[in-house]
Image: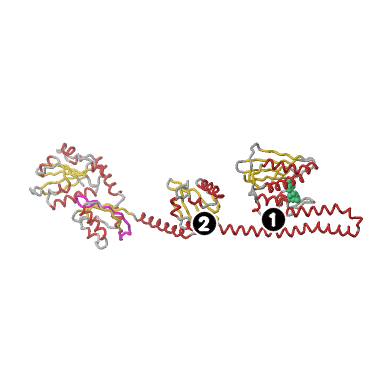
């Protein structure tokens, strides 16, 4: 809304009492044709970067003629002066293009103008005028949105360059034409309807439209003013296109998320709030998505007790770096399922999230188990052949000696010892083999004091060590803690390893067993200063029937490895030719 402030002379000349009024009110002081002329001249002044403009006006009441001069002031306002019969009166109007801040300032017009009413307006300095021109030019040309003024008679009185670009019309020749002569109503019906609404209701109207001429989507804001309406047009084609692309990609994502069997999820890093979980979640876990959103921790309740801490640990890790975990759950029908959960942290818009996938790996696990079983089966077949072979040799020898003994009873005593040796060998093989076939399910866990157990085994093997004058040593951490394991199997492990070490070292050598404890695991090392192993031997160790000993079975290490894996432990060999061997076993506590 443009306000006009009048000085005394202006009030007197036009016989108006008010010192302040709207521009449209003030302009009605002149005749109709004069009003048009004034508006057009004002428009030229605004759009053509002129500094001043003048126009002939005629008073409505007294039919007096005036020369009206209008010019830009540095503060963005416009000063009008009327000259008729040698007098001069002034008023000013805030520029329609001036900023809001300036618009809202009280207009101090009668100060600068009335104080200098005797002065000609052209006395504004050159610097000031260039500044104004650039400013106006800048405002109009660089204004990033389309801007148009339409008066109450539906005539287009102004449009900026951007408006020409957006609409694809040249407006210069169309000023003061009716809007419908420029834009056919049937093609722009929506626009007309909204403009009409703004004019009639005197309310700002906002809407989205499409300009067929330039294939442009626009956001239109229509402000009613004293002289009609001001139309702002913002090109939102690119925004619309992005929105469409976003919608499409969202739809694609939904399609994917709704159809993959795997569950996709997004969570808060502390897993206390779930942002998204795909529909297959319900089927996999037997928990509704609603339940999961309301209480993300509900998942944990379906997880096997033994696997809960592993899952929790993996979740904690995921907020820092990528992590993966496999665990068992009970689904809605109480069936056991293996789930693999992968997740990693992401940063988005300054917020941290964890993104992940749940996969049902039950079938995969079953297949793996089957494969392992079939592998075991084939090792057993292989081994049976090996065992048959291993047993056949001593058996042939026994049979041979027995036959000789039967034929020559006087020689029988000579072969007694050889036969016993061969029988012992068969017994050792059968013992080892029986250990191998013991199922994991037969494990019976007990609280075991490792130091006690190791010293028991060492005492057991002492006679053998003494024979070779070998030192058996025990080194132990100060921390004394029990572990949960099966003592029989742990005994077997130690016997096998210490025996091998005794076999390996020379007369007067040394075998050292070291016990180390951490909060999580027990580490047992069997260290000898024997001849060590070549890399080839190291690669072969643990293979069935690999032995370098005359009376060896080549089953000891293999059996040891099997028992350790049944107890969920690990074994490593460290050895160099001539430097001794260290075997390290780690078992969970
Ligand atoms: P066996 O003791 O009946 O030979 P094992 O499976 O126990 O069978 O051992 C296989 C082979 O591994 C041994 O014959 C030996 O060559 C090698 N070996 C095992 N432990 C050691 C060790 N501490 N030092 C050197 N060699 C070893
Ligand atoms: Mg052995």
Q: Which residue is mark 2?
A: 331
Q: Is the C-beta of the residue carrying label 2 under 8 Å from the nearest atom of ligand 1? A: no
How many discs mark residues in the rendered view? 2
Quadrant housing residue 513:
top right
**Mark 2 secondary-structure assignment:** loop
Magenta region: 210-229
70 with respect to 556 (left or right): left
Q: Is the C-beta of the residue carrying label 1 under 8 Å from the nearest atom of ligand 1? A: no
Q: Residue at x 34, y 54 (%)?
A: 236
Q: Is residue 51 above or below residue 380?
A: above
Return the x and y of residue 137 as percentages of the image width and height: 27, 47
| Mark seen at residue 400 | none
Q: Which residue is mark 1?
A: 437
Quadrant housing residue 197:
bottom left
Return the x and y of residue 217 as percentages of the image width and height: 32, 57
Residues packed near mark 2 inside 10 Å, few (<14), some (14 to 19) or many (20 plus)? some
92 with respect to 217 (left or right): left
Residues packed near mark 1 inside 10 Å, few (<14), some (14 to 19) or many (20 plus)? few
Find the distance from the CA under tag 2 to the CA under tag 1.
33 Å
Q: Which secondary structure dominates the residues rendered in magenta?
A: strand
> Does the segment drawn in magenta span residue 218?
yes
Q: Is residue 532 visible?
A: no
């Amino acid at each position: 809304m443009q306000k006009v402030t009048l000085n005394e002379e202006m009030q007197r000349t036009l016989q108006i009492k008010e010192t302040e009024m709207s521009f449209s009110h003030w302009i009605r002081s002149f005749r109709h044709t004069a009003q048009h002329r004034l508006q057009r001249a004002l428009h030229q002044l605004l759009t053509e970067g002129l500094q001043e403009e003048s126009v002939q006006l005629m008073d409505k009441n007294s039919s007096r003629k005036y020369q009206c001069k209008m010019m830009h002031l540095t503060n963005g306002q416009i000063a009008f002066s009327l000259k008729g019969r040698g007098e001069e009166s002034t008023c000013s109007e805030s520029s329609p293009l001036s900023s809001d801040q300036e618009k809202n300032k009280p207009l101090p017009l009668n100060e600068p103008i009335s104080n200098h009413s005797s002065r000609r307006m052209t006395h504004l300095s050159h610097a000031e005028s260039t500044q104004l021109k650039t400013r106006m030019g800048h405002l109009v040309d660089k204004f990033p949105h389309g801007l148009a003024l339409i008066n109450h008679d539906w005539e287009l009185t102004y449009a900026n360059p951007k408006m020409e670009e957006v609409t694809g019309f040249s407006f210069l020749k169309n000023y003061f034409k009716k809007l419908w002569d420029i834009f056919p109503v049937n093609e722009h019906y929506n626009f007309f309807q909204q403009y009409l609404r703004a004019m009639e209701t005197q309310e700002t109207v906002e809407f989205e439209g499409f300009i067929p001429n330039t294939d442009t989507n626009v956001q239109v804001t229509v402000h009613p003013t004293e002289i009609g309406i001001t139309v702002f047009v913002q090109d939102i084609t690119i925004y619309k296109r992005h929105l469409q692309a976003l919608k499409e990609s969202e739809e694609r994502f939904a399609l994917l998320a709704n159809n993959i069997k795997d569950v996709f999820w997004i969570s808060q890093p502390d897993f206390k709030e779930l942002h998204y979980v795909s529909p297959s979640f319900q089927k996999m876990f037997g928990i509704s998505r609603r339940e999961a959103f309301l209480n993300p921790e509900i998942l944990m309740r379906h997880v096997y007790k033994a696997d809960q801490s592993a899952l929790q640990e993996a979740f904690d890790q995921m907020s820092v770096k990528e992590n993966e975990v496999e665990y068992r759950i009970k689904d809605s029908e109480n069936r056991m399922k293996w789930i693999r959960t992968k997740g990693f942290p992401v940063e988005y818009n300054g917020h941290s999230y964890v993104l992940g996938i749940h996969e049902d790996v039950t079938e995969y696990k079953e297949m793996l188990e089957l494969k392992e079983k079939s592998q075991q089966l084939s090792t057993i077949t292989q081994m049976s052949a090996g065992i048959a072979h291993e047993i056949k040799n001593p058996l042939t020898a026994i049979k041979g000696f027995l036959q000789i003994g039967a034929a020559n009873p006087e020689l029988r005593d000579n072969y007694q010892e050889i036969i016993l040796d061969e029988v012992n060998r068969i017994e050792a093989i059968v013992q080892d083999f029986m250990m191998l076939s013991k199922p994991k399910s037969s494990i019976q866990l007990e609280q075991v004091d490792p130091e006690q157990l190791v010293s028991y085994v060492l005492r057991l093997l002492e006679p053998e060590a003494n024979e070779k004058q070998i030192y058996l040593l025990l080194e132990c951490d100060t921390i004394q803690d029990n572990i949960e394991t099966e003592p029989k199997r742990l005994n077997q492990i130690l016997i096998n390893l210490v025996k091998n070490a005794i076999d390996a070292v020379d007369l007067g050598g040394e075998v050292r067993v070291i016990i180390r404890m951490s909060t999580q695991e027990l580490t047992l090392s069997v260290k000898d200063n024997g001849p060590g192993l070549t890399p080839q031997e190291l690669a072969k160790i643990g293979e069935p029937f690999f032995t370098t000993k005359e009376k060896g079975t080549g089953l000891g290490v293999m059996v040891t490895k099997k028992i350790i894996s049944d107890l969920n432990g690990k074994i490593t060999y460290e050895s160099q030719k001539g430097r001794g061997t260290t075997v390290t076993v780690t078992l969970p506590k």
